Amino acid sequence: MRVSNLLMPTLRELPAEAEVVSHQLLLRAGFIRKAAAGVYTLLPLAWRVIRKIEQIIREEMDRQGGQELMMPIIQPAELWHESGRWDVYGPELFRLKDRHGRDFCLGPTHEEIITALIRGEINSYKQLPLLLYQIQNKYRDERRPRFGLLRGREFIMKDLYSFDRDEAGLDISYNKMFEAYTNVFRRCGLRFRPVVADSGAIGGSDTHEFAVLAESGEATILYCENDECGYAANEERAEAVASTSTGNMAPLEMKKISTPDCRTIEEVALFLKLPPEKMIKTMIYSTEKETVAAMVRGDREINEVKLYNALGCIRLDLADEETVLRVTGAPAGFAGPVNLKGVKLVADREVMTLANAVCGANENDYHLVNVNPGRDFKPDIIADIRLVKAGEPCPVCGAGLHEAKGIEVGQIFKLGDKYSKALGATFLDENGKARPFIMGCYGIGVTRTMAAAVEQNHDERGIKWPVQIAPYHVIVVPVSTKDKDQVNAAEEIYQNLVTGGVETVIDDRPERAGVKFKDADLVGYPIRITVGAKGLAEGKVELYSRLEEQTMMVPLGDVVNAVKSKLRELAAG
């Protein structure tokens, strides 16, 4: 490919709309252009990267016995009503009507469609297991699309669904996908971690996220410092280890004391001259069914995902001021679990270890001291509902936990019979008994993987693509297009590389060398071959490795072999 013919509209200025590095660089380097909020056109360079990621995915899915198909993007509402998700999925679901007034949605995911397909086509255990996948556009009406391809409303995703006869079969399918995903992201040249995660709107039991490590990542990952342990979880699912009591174990008489204008834990701690870990933080929430008082130790934060799972609710929101006043009798800042009527009490496990603690008195400007869980209040639910932070002990081996930022690029789920039961999808076992399929689902964000690769591999000059997914491997740059010797040598090198199977472009534009070098660095070609007068005089050209930022002089006759050798070296890491 000749750069003069390549649709590569590079930008010199930093786009004002772009907040994160991948968004900035993919716009500046001419990979993407915005069509609408959260919707992007993928230009030729981006599409080459996408196709390479897709090919790696296909090879790894096929290696595990996956079969590729293609399901419709437009899905009938009836199937979503059967699964119960039409009303539950929320405003992210793109809903539309056809000319006859029938409800449809644009697929954000395909559990309903695939389950209905298998319900009609598979009827015997002899036809199992099945691994079916597609690579397709997905649609989610994000409230605030941002970060370019990292959080869009239209994106490319690979989703695979497994169908097994029992949980043992699901374990095998799940482990196959765990291995396949590990191979996919390794082959894409990315640094990543598989972490225990929350299943969210998809549902199911066990699930792992695959997170690309990057400082700009939205996900917080906690992992054990002991490499032999291997524990890692995202912040939503990291399991807390409850500490022992921080107070005098002999219960004292509970008392109400005045705490004027002390609403926050910090203010109460300062007023009473007590550490925050001696206090009970009580937050009031509303669900679709009831009002909830959730409690954690004063120096902790509530993990709303854990609370949501503990309650088994559909909707969870912080209660408004009116609700707080109605249920507690006091404004926000003075809530406590003692004598709190008509409210479900949910206590973190750590709260139950406290002795002679402090909490709100449900009265303006008053708190209770010497509060003892079990004696003074009895929670309806005791569960791990707090956020875990770096430095806390690993729940598996007790070593310290470290923290890192990551970008979720894939997730695998054990669905069990969640969808097969809801949609009546069954097969006959060897005894002729109808049983629901045991399912799993496994997704990879293809466009997000491309953006995550940029977040992880860049510098101040531009992108530094891993060789495995670079749009082209080599760019040949003649320093001066007015010098016939340079042009002829560059053309010969270009043709030899293309003939030798190396993905190569030649920058044949009549631009200054500095412009060409800047564009080459911005786009991120792994290797740049520079043909200049000084080198040609010695029968050599310059080979520059973008990833290593190293330069070497190579004889003209050895260019193809030197390039291939360097590409193998870079791909091997």
Image (spheres, rainbow, N blue to C red):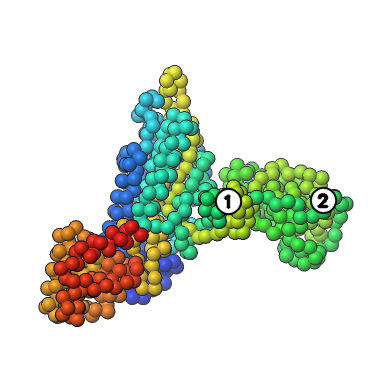
Alpha carbon distance from label 2 to label 1? 29 Å
Q: Which mark is residue 178?
A: none
Residue 207, given in percent of the width and then of the height, sits at 50, 44
Look at mark 2 in the image and give the residue it sits on: 249
Q: Are marks 2 and 1 in contact (CB under 8 Å)?
A: no
x and y, in percent, of residue 312 in the image: 60, 42
Q: Amino acid at mark 2?
A: Met
Q: Is residue 112 above or below residue 428?
A: below
Residue extending furthest toward the right: 253
Quadrant position of the C terminus in the picture? bottom left
Q: Quadrant of residue 76?
A: top left
Task: Please state the total of marks drawn on the protein image.
Answer: 2
Amino acid carrying mark 1 in the image = Ala
Residue 152 image position (x, y, % from top left): 41, 57
The numbered mark at residue 238 is: 1
Q: Nearer the viewer, residue 161 or 426?
A: 161
Which residue is drawn at the image coordinates 81% and 47% (left, top)?
Answer: 376
**Label 1: how many residues lie within 10 Å, few (<14), some (14-19) or many (20+)?**
many
Give left or right: position of 537 versus 256.
left
Q: Earlier in the sequence, mark 2 or mark 1?
A: 1
Observer able to see residue 139: no
The N terminus is located in which quarter? bottom left
Dot 2 surroundings within 10 Å: few (below 14), some, or many (20 or more)? few
Helix, strand or loop for disc 2? loop
Which of the 4 image quadrants contains residue 258?
A: bottom right
Q: Position of residue 67 (x, y in %)?
A: 32, 38
- Decide which of 43, 347 is in the foreground and name it: 347
- Residue at position x 29%, y 54% in the image: 52
